[in-house]
Image: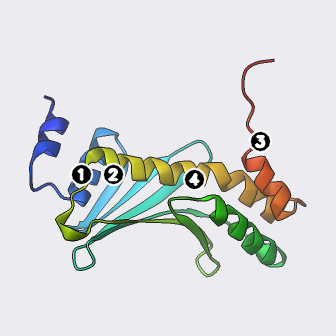
Amino acid sequence: MNKVEKALAADDVGPIDIAEILAKNNDWDFDRLDEDQIQMEIEANWRIYGLDLSWNSFEESLRLACSFELSVPKDKITKLVKLLNLVNIKCWTGSFVFSEESTLMIFKYGLNLTGGSFTSALQINSILETSILACETYYPAFQLVCWGDETPSEALAVAFDKSYGTA
């Protein structure tokens, strides 16, 4: 059993502790703000994403916000909102919101752990991966609506237009 597995096997390891261990193990930049919150940066194909993972013991919930900066011309805000509605219909495990004030696109995810439920490293890793994958999947569509002439429907189609195999 390696050091990471031993640390994760302890009974008193909370979700934020698990996230910190995963961040260290993956060499992600992170800042442990307090015992119930950690911020990380994870580099993917399109962007470097900021992730904020918070544990609320009163609500017994784990909240994740995965964000990236998105500049949106004022005349494209309406099209972006229409695209967000289409995107959120397709998202099963979270949703996107756009903060016009801070120019941040945020993917929000919540995990309810009521009744003393525990979370595992596999679950925490899955939450992080799911959030990054959602941002990576829809990032091109957001860009096309903000900076191209595509309609929200056309931009969404691009997000799912993947090439398979070789020519």
Q: Calculate the distance from the C-alpha at mark 4 to the C-alpha at mark 3.
A: 15 Å
Which numbered disc flags the more N-terminal residue, 2 or 1?
A: 1
Q: Calculate the distance from the C-alpha at mark 4 to the C-alpha at mark 2.
A: 16 Å
Q: Point out the image quarter for the N terminus.
A: top left
Residue that badge 2 annotates: 124
Q: Position of residue 123 (x, y in %)?
A: 33, 49
Asked whether 86 or 134 is in front, the reply is 86
Q: Secondary structure at mark 1?
A: helix
Q: Secondary structure at mark 2?
A: helix
Residue type at tag 3: Asp
Of tags 1 and 3, the one toward the viewer is: 3
Residue at position x 75%, y 31% from top?
Answer: 163
Residue that badge 3 annotates: 161
Q: Position of residue 149 (x, y in %)?
A: 90, 61
Q: Relative to 121, is 158 on the left or the right?
A: right
Residue 147 — which label? none
Q: Calculate the distance from the C-alpha at mark 1 to the C-alpha at mark 4.
A: 22 Å
Residue that badge 1 annotates: 18
Q: Calculate the distance from the C-alpha at mark 2 to the C-alpha at mark 1.
A: 7 Å
Q: Point out the image quarter for the C terminus.
A: top right
- Circle 1 packing at 10 Å, graded few (<14), some (14-19), many (20+), is many
Residue type at tag 2: Ile
Residue that badge 4 annotates: 134
Residue that lies at the very extreme toward the left in this rendered image: 11
